[in-house]
Amino acid sequence: HAKKQGRNNFQFHSDNQIRELDRDYQIELEVTDALERNEFSLVYQPLINLKTNKIVGVESLLRWDNRLLGKVSPMEFIPVLEETGLIVPVGKWILHSVCHQMMSWQQQGLFLQRVSVNVSPLQFRDPYFIADLKEILHEAQLDASYLELEITEGTLLDIEDSTKKLHDLQELGVKVSIDDFGTGYSSLSYLKQLPIDTLKIDKSFIDDLDRDGKIIVNTIISMGKNLQFRIIAEGIENSDQFKYLQEQQCHEGQGYFFSRPVNSERIEELYHSLQ
Ligand code: C2E
Ligand code: MG
Ligand code: MG
Ligand code: MG
């Protein structure tokens, strides 16, 4: 599209497009050495069991605080990491850091059933992905069953490669969840043929619960549960949504209603206050 062509071709752009190009270009320039400059960090958002109201796990989320641009949203810089291939080394750093954090929590007596890590399509497709992951788990001494990888339906479009990788992960003992479920085109019957543990219902359906979202959410929960998936609702922001999902016996929830993503120390405080 125009944004990509604009870098090398002569084209007419509106002022807005030029500003956007400048920002994208600046992000690309700055993100290249962000790992070396130690500008990345990780925050964690609790996953709550909706029956017991306890923290059963956390999702790790990447943060970037740049010397020139300040805090940049993952929605802005993750696509740049993907386009440039930088997501591969950065993704390795994320997996390494998260596995070590989880191990350190276990050593402190803080027991979470799992930690989930977002994995981009390009990172998942990398031929060394499984080998690198094995090495990271081994080095961190973390039991693979505590790790869950979040991929989107888009990652599954590469059917042959993703099917092979999913089976490799199953063999390793690493869990897999489908992030933003419902926004892509994969059917539950297709997903059931793959070694996938969890479906995360996209926030847009939770936002729509007070309108016509109920039918979709109820269908995902009941069909998903019958097919033995763990079901998580993303983006729970208020008690109405929380109560509704609890009534529908959705397994787990995540959202600002429980906690925003926070640093590891804050997870420790939350964990102890909620157990
Ligand atoms: P995601 O994996 O679907 O993560 C959920 C996003 O929703 C997070 O945004 C989280 O902060 C936000 N969120 C959680 N609860 C609520 C809520 O109640 N209300 C609202 N409005 N938002 C909520 P964040 O951290 O900005 O991340 C955005 C996306 O960037 C993620 O979506 C994921 O696709 C990507 N991302 C973040 N960290 C990583 C990472 O380490 N690796 C990769 N590959 N992608 C990442
Ligand atoms: Mg996610
Ligand atoms: Mg999501
Ligand atoms: Mg998302």
Image (cartoon, rainbow, N blue to C red):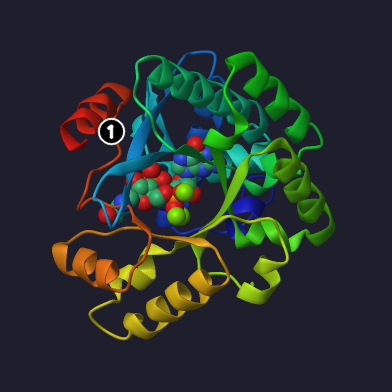
Which residue is nearer to you in this view: 31 or 116? 116
Q: x and y percent of residue 56 in the render? A: 36, 42
Whether residue 187 sits left or right of residue 161 in the image: it is left
Which residue is nearer to you in this view: 144 or 254? 144
Residue 62, by quadrant, is top left
Q: Residue, x 59% and y 17% (percent of image)? A: 141
Q: Is residue 17 above or below residue 33?
A: below
Q: Is residue 155 above or below residue 26?
A: below
Q: x and y percent of residue 272 in the render? A: 21, 28
Q: For the residue labelled by badge 1, is the local secondary structure a helix, a strand or a loop?
A: loop
Q: x and y percent of residue 228 in the render? A: 55, 65
- Residue 24 visible, this angle: no
Q: Residue, x 17% and y 62% (percent of image)? A: 238
Q: x and y percent of residue 81 in the render? A: 59, 37
Q: Is residue 52 above or below residue 247?
A: above
Cβ at disc 1 under 8 Å from ligand 1: no
Rendered-image quadrant of the C terminus: top left
Rendered-image quadrant of the N terminus: bottom right
Q: Residue, x 25% and y 32% (percent of image)? A: 271
Q: Residue, x 54% and y 27% (percent of image)? A: 94
Residue 263, by quadrant, is top left
Residue 240, by quadrant, is bottom left
Q: Amino acid at mark 1?
A: Val
- Residue 139 visible, this angle: yes
Residue matched to label 1: 262
